[in-house]
Amino acid sequence: MRSILLPLSILLTSTLALAQLEGLPHVLTPAELPLIPEYKATRADAGRGISTPPPFAVRTMAEWEEVQTLVITWTSYTGILKQIVRAAVDECEVMIACSNPSTVESFLLNSQYGGPIDNLDNVTYLTTSFNSVWQRDYGAECIYMNEVDSLFLLDWIYNRPRPADDAMADAIAAAKGINLYSTTTAPYDLVHTGGNFMADGFGTAFSSNLVLDENGPSGSFNTTVRDAAGVDDMMQQFMGIAQGRYIKMETLPYDGIHHIDMHMKLLDEETLLIGQFPAGTSDGPQLEQNVEYVTSTYNSVFGTPYRVVRIPMPSSTGGAYPPSASYRTFANNLFLNKTVLVPTYREQYDTTAMRILHESLPGYRIVGIDCDNSDQNIISASGAIHCITKCIGVDDPLLIKHQRLSDTYETVTPYSVDAYIRHKTGIASAEVYWTTDTTAGFSAVPMTLVSGNDWTAAIPAQPAGSFVYYYIHAAANGGKEQVRPIVAPHGWWRFEVLDINAGIGEAAGPSISEVFPNPTEGIVVIDLAHVGRDRVRIALHDATGREVMRIQDGPLHADGRAFADLSALPSGAYLLVAESARGRSVTKLVRR
């Protein structure tokens, strides 16, 4: 354990009567509205950090990259914060911004919320001012010079009149000894919030149109008025987001804060985790329009369509969704090296979400943290795990970019594995490790430097029906080693060698391949095969044959997966029917 007390010259003495208030919600409160003009004037004159664009090429860190420090603010929801600390101390340093380190440590060592935390060696206490718990939004972003050379932090203007929160990035930068860039002073001022920003690590970023609203003529916190091109230019100069690659989506009608981390997550450079509501419910229609816009307009950094993984958005205990209930989400999760922290709610939803995350992120330790219980109900304040945490990347990243291999019919030609690999000291060697049986271990194939930072290797061809598992390892000249995925060899990429003869024959209709969980108390996931682009109707029928729920009536998503929330139905056995013009499939489904 280490304690940092910043000099008084660095600690912010707020001119507003908000410092150290606990329990401020994620949203802007009515009482804060009159405080905006003074905050705006004070913020514009602060001039903290380096307020001109970096004079070098910039790369913004992706969330799945290697982390040295997790930062949280110790104020409200301390039971949830303690659970985060418990999971995080095994992965990295945990910096706790607080007013009284002794009080925090006593809480971490008491019997509440899972008992005492045995090892606090990785905990650092940063004594500084704060207004609220929402570290994601006001904490510093991580940028690298020339992709991997040096780490810098970046601070935006926080879109709340909470001056101590807004100065948090300065306190963290000073404590860590990392230089800070800041979009605080005209003409380089920009209002933004961390919950409304995600980057792929290679020049692509996502936000809702909130970033345009808050920097446009109707913005409350901006000094310089910018159009979309002006916002894009700022993001390119300070964060390395490529022109034409800052993807902005319509705000959702019932998401009160319009932060994309409440309903989506980048799992890697080409995979979007998207929250899904029951058909036609709540923000579902606009969210699906946004997904369609993104996937039809943009490709991943590899030039190929984005992969979309959907995860259900839970209802309230009474079966309601926004605007009649809180905005519950599993997408608001946190990568922390080899661990993923996930908000949880109730078992009938959690088990489904955990299974989807384990399937999508093999090898990661996935830790659920209850965000919907009676005394720690953070979700009712419009936030969860991602919203109250911020990560600082390592000083010397070993960067590996690779587009996973897709399923193939190839059984003769070896499978080429290409990767972009870079470290500030240069790369000494790289290998692809592969196997068709993870219990038997992996074989190594040396990678060859093609040119620049591009490496290649080939996995031997395998017979049809094989599943091939693989990962990449690299070692830098300076001695650093890294694997991708970061959890390898416990996690890996996988592709199947398909049988070219298996698809011969008359096309079949939709086939229900799996339903889980079954029995269910709420959310159910339906996996279908042979759906193609056909219009598919999925319905639930009771014992008399009467249709009691229409789950789907139209083309399915590319993943062949549909969701339904059965919590409002009576307990009993039902028939699940999936049909198209080419055929029909039926299975039994039990509502507990």
Image (tube, grey):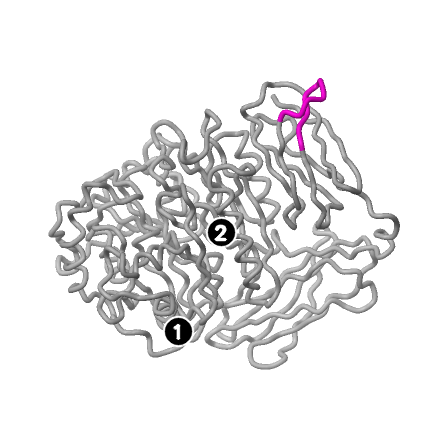
Quick check: can you spot residue 93?
no
Q: What SS does tag 1 mark?
A: strand
Rendered location of residue 575, percent (x, y): 71, 26
Q: What stretch is highlighted in magenta?
A: 539-548
Q: Is residue 105 left or right of residue 479?
A: left
The number of numbered discs placed on residues in the rendered structure image is 2
| Comes first in the chain, label 2 or label 1 | 1
Front residue (pair 538, 401)? 538
Residue type marked 2 = Lys
Residue type marked 1 = Met
Which residue appears at 48% of the width and 49% of the height?
264
Q: Name the residue under label 2.
A: 265
Which residue appears at 83% of the width and 67% of the height?
412
Rendered location of residue 42, percent (x, y): 15, 59
The residue carrying pointer 2 sits among few (fewer than 14), some (14 to 19) or many (20 or more) residues within 10 Å by Cα, namely many
Front residue (pair 563, 53)? 563
- 256 relative to 65, above or below: above
Q: Is residue 235 left or right of residue 225?
A: right
Rendered location of residue 313, percent (x, y): 50, 38
Front residue (pair 506, 25)? 506
- 103 relative to 148, above or below: above
Rendered location of residue 373, percent (x, y): 39, 29
Q: Name the residue under label 1.
A: 145
Which residue appears at 41% of the width and 61% of the height?
393
